[in-house]
Amino acid sequence: MAFWNKLFGTGDPHRVDYYREGVDLLREGKFHDALTSFRLALKDAPGDTVVLQQIAVCYTRIGMTEEAAKTYRHVLQKDPEASGAHYGLAFILLRSGLPDEAIGHLEAFLAHAPPPETASNHIAHARATLAQLRGERHESPPEPPPDELF
């Protein structure tokens, strides 16, 4: 039902679209406010993996990387092919000094990557990072794209 509400609206013109509000706040750098909106969106759509991934992005941005990693893992339990969760978790693992674990998530991200039109920067960053981790490249990978989902 949540999918249909997102697609067609709820019919109530006064109802707040907390997901859209959260995305806008995230883009503005208002991470705590975005987190609140995403939590409210999750009440409208319990267990929604897209909302959960945005919550993990917020956690990452405010420095709650353990919570972000837990949230990404929760998403992957629900949807093992969730590319955004693989991508986000890979870079948390890298920053935590766990490159071997990150490699698997980068490979999974690339195996299920979103279309290049929406995620070309993320795809390029994942490929470059993976090549560097495998010893195929010696220069640093390009700057990562923003932590928002595709």
Image (spheres, rainbow, N blue to C red):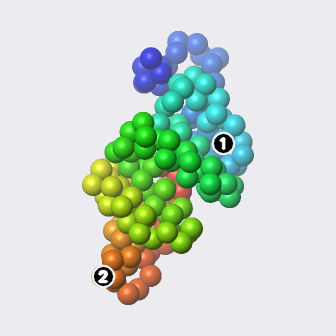
* Percent position of residue 80, x then y: 36, 43
Asked if labels 2 and 1 touch by Cβ distance under 8 angstroms, the answer is no
**Residue at 50 percent of width and 41 percent of height:** 74
Residue type at numbered disc 2: Glu
**Residue at 30 percent of width and 82 percent of height:** 136
User: Where, by quadrant of the figure, is residue 120 drawn?
Assistant: bottom left
Q: Which residue is mark 1?
A: 34
**Residue at 36 percent of width and 71 percent of height:** 130
Q: Which residue is mark 2?
A: 136
Q: Is residue 91 above or below residue 141?
A: above
* Percent position of residue 73, x then y: 49, 47
Of label 1 and label 2, which has the lower sequence position? 1
Q: Report the side of 125 relative to 48 (left or right).
A: left
Which disc number belongs to residue 134?
none
**Residue at 68 percent of width and 49 percent of height:** 31
Q: Is residue 9 above or below residue 141?
A: above
Q: Report the side of 89 relative to 35 (left or right).
A: left
* Percent position of residue 61, x then y: 64, 56
